[in-house]
Amino acid sequence: MNYYLGLDIGSSSIKAALVEVESGKSLGVVQEPKEEMGMYAAKNGWAEQSPNDWWKHICNAITQLKKKYNVSKTQIKGIGISYQMHGLVVIDKEGNPLRKSIIWCDSRAVETGNTAFNEIGNDTCATNLLNSPANFTASKLKWVKDNEPDIYNKIYKFMLPGDYVAYKFSNTINTTISGLSEGIFWNFKEDNVADFLLEHYGIDKALVPDIVETFGVQSTVDEKGEAESGIAAGTPIFYRAGDQPNNALSLNVFNPGEVAATGGTSGVVYAVTDSLSAKESSRVNNFAHVNYQKGADPRIGKLLCVNGAGIQYRWLLNNLAVSSYEEMNTLASEIPVGSDGVCLIPFGNGAERMLNNKEIGTRIVNMNLNNHHKGHMCRAALEGIAFSFVYGMEIMTSDGIKPSVIRAGNDNLFRSEIFANTVATLIEQEIEIYNTTGAIGAARAANLHNGDFEAFGKAIMDNDHVMTFMPFKDKKPYLEAYNNWKNELELIINKK
């Protein structure tokens, strides 16, 4: 039996998966390290990780995976890589990292990006970059130039985290259009590297890696890569993408109208469109999706993040007199739609970009101490989080998204019928639930070098489909509850 290896390089752990080449069936997934990876934070708001720590954990995960499933290196026929987005790795001519990676959640470059947005012009950024430079990779590189000139002057190439991992396997430096776009290095209007932003930041274009296709032979494992990783020299790296585009790929989301959703600690709505509209660029990010190609109809992934999502339900689990999510879901199911008027605004996980970066916290309103109890709290929390997803979908729709189907991973929130039914009914679209992971998706994507997207989608449907939530015919009680919630939210926003 032959396999593809999939790697998912997160900021908390590395996941490695094997899938069968022929069927796409997952053999298994392992995680390294067992505990969460640490982050270095020399100052508040900073977050850094050592790129060679990622590599060490990847090599350990591959060793563990081969041993656990009795797979030899010659049985692994290709590699797919998913990675934490927006990170910055800088290397010297010998290929050594010059400093720790400034990762996605590091906020030191916010002011750099905001200043550039105003100096270059909002319209120019929206039309060409489809985003503000904001706190993305390009702005982090500019921060290094301004604050660490000795390091900047030694840079041979900058990379995204997945580019560095591919380099460690192959000793080959390259990147993708999708990757450059997530760093805000891509000019969609010119369909090329964003020279005007590099010039504004004073960044030498020679630091940009060579560009390769997202699907295809990007490089091959060399002898040093084999010695360190245990993957045979000559094994091709067939694919790499940032974690959110890769999550969409894992759910077979490639075409306009298809939407991927995740409902973990925070929530993400990632919708594919063929429009270059960026009128909501201050609230929604726009990146080249994995199947974006120069000169073809664009495939843009619009990404909207809801910070206050599953963290709200977890807080209730930890602080209410309940023992499990199952108990909370049972209590919630005994309460009618609308929670008898109780509204929970779930935005207690920092500033919300979709609310124009306002930090409004969690609010519980309309609680009657004689009539309401923890069941109402549980129902109101699930509904409030669902309503925040619907609110985000309304923003996406105003920016040209016409959802035709929503596909979601089988994670905590989407295991709740109340949550999934509420979203499906309000947006009047079915929600397909799949049991998959980013590492499995990346492994399967290695097979897309052959261009057979139909077989790729069939493998996901055959192996991963769990269930489909259909919208209820009677939308009225859900709409009343949502409008009540939205009114409460807007009262809070207008006071800020």
Image (cartoon, helix red, strand yellow):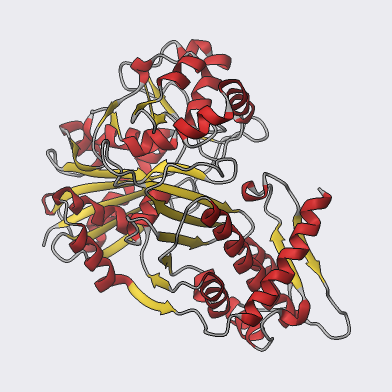
* Image quarter (top left, top right, bottom left or bottom right) of the N terminus: bottom left
State whether residue 241 is above or below residue 212: below
Residue 243 in view here: no
**Image-based side of 418 in relation to 362, left or right:** left
Q: Residue at x 67, y 78 (%)?
A: 379
Task: Say which of 480 and 93 sits in front.
Answer: 480
The quadrant holding residue 433 is: bottom left
- What residue is shown at x 48% (from left), y 52% (from top)? 400
List x then y, in percent, for residue 376: 73, 80
- Rendered location of residue 191, percent (x, y): 33, 31
Decide: is 348 above or below 39: below
In the rendered view, does 491 fall on the left or right side of 53? right
- In the picture provided, is 439 more to the left or to the right than 323? left
Looking at the picture, does residue 429 appear above or below residue 139?
Answer: below
Residue drawn at (26%, 36%) of the image: 295
The answer to whether one can see residue 134 in this image is yes
Residue at 56% over, 33% down: 135
Give the percent coordinates (x, y) of residue 350. 69, 49
Looking at the rendered structure, the number of numbered marks drawn on it comes to 0
> Which sits in the foreground, 305 or 395?
395
Say if 351 sits above or below 397 in the image: above
- How far across and how far down the image is residue 251, in percent? 35, 62
